[in-house]
Image (tube, grey):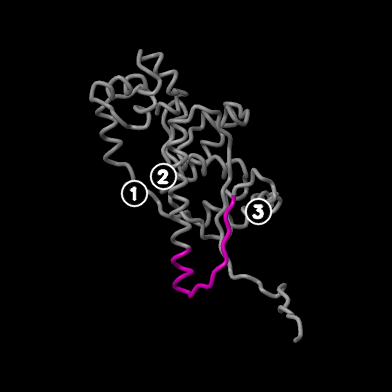
Amino acid sequence: MLRAGGWTGRRLADELGVGEATAKRWLAGRGLTLEGLDRLADIAGTDIAELSRLAEGAGEGLAQELTLAQERALSQDAFLSFLFIVILGGYSPTEVAKDFDVTPRQMEAALLRLERLALIDRRPGWRVRPLVDRSIVWRKTPMRAMFEDRMKEQFLAMDFADERAVYASEVMKLSAQGAATLAELIEQHRRDVQALAERDRDMAHLPRSWHGMLCAARPLDMSGLDAFEGETV
């Protein structure tokens, strides 16, 4: 709620008369007393009773995957799909509107579409709650096809020789069971990155920019390798 209202650690520190480091710890949910929680709730326009009710329902009844109709609707609108994905990641519509110069009218229309698709629950002041579990895995064709059309090229065009490029690669032999375990490790890595983004959002002092991450594994095409031709003795 605080993030949706544009409250940062520095702004909270000024409002509450505490150090910025303390305010950021509170935003991250650490070191909060009942009194501190009550003060934050008041700033967010809520109270502890409502927070308690929200906490009891957190994670309950969240969809584990999208319907085909929902994926089709998202895949037909690049901004709508991006907005939904970042809402799942904990980012507020207010932050997205600021970063991409989205007008209030445009954001209202997008949030209304997401609400009608039963993907979010809207609250006053552009506060939203996703109705889908953030660990969702995109398994259906529409969103995978959208990634193929719009996102894949960004990774294919990446200059892997650039010293600023961040990537890791490995070649290995795996059984079917090993490949399945690798898929689980990749999914766990995605969740670890989500946790990293949350910590960075709460604690970072440097400006942040949007990043995309792709973790992929596939059977190697070995046809391009020529047999080693050693010197004849």
Residue hosting label 3: 152
Is residue 168 one of those drawn in magenta?
yes
Of the residues under marks 2 and 1, which one precedes in the sequence? 1
The amino acid type, in three-letter code, at marker 3 is: Lys
Task: In the rendered structure, find residue 131 and report the number of the disc placed on it.
Answer: 2
Q: Is residue 98 left or right of residue 90?
A: right
Work out whether 172 lies above or below 13: below
Between 75 and 179, the one nearer to me in the picture: 179
Residue at the limit of the structure toward the right, as seen here: 232
Secondary structure under the numbered disc 1 in the rendered image:
loop
Query: Residue 154 versus residue 143: which sits nearer the camera?
Result: 154
Q: Image point 37% across, 28% down: which residue?
A: 27
Q: CA distance from mark 3 to mark 1?
A: 32 Å
User: How would you rate the neighbour count of disc 2 (Cα within 10 Å): few for under 14, some for 14-19, many for 20 or more?
Assistant: some
Helix, strand or loop status at disc 3:
helix
Q: Earlier along the polypeptide chain: callout 3 or callout 2?
A: 2
Mark 3 or mark 2, whichever is nearer to me: 3
The residue pinned by badge 1 equals 61
Q: Which residues are magenta?
A: 167-182
Percent coordinates x, y for residue 143 in the rendering: 57, 54
| Quarter of the rendering containing residue 219 | bottom right
Label 1 near label 2: C-beta < 8 Å? yes
Residue at x 48%, y 35% (from the top left corner): 91
Q: Is residue 34 magenta?
A: no
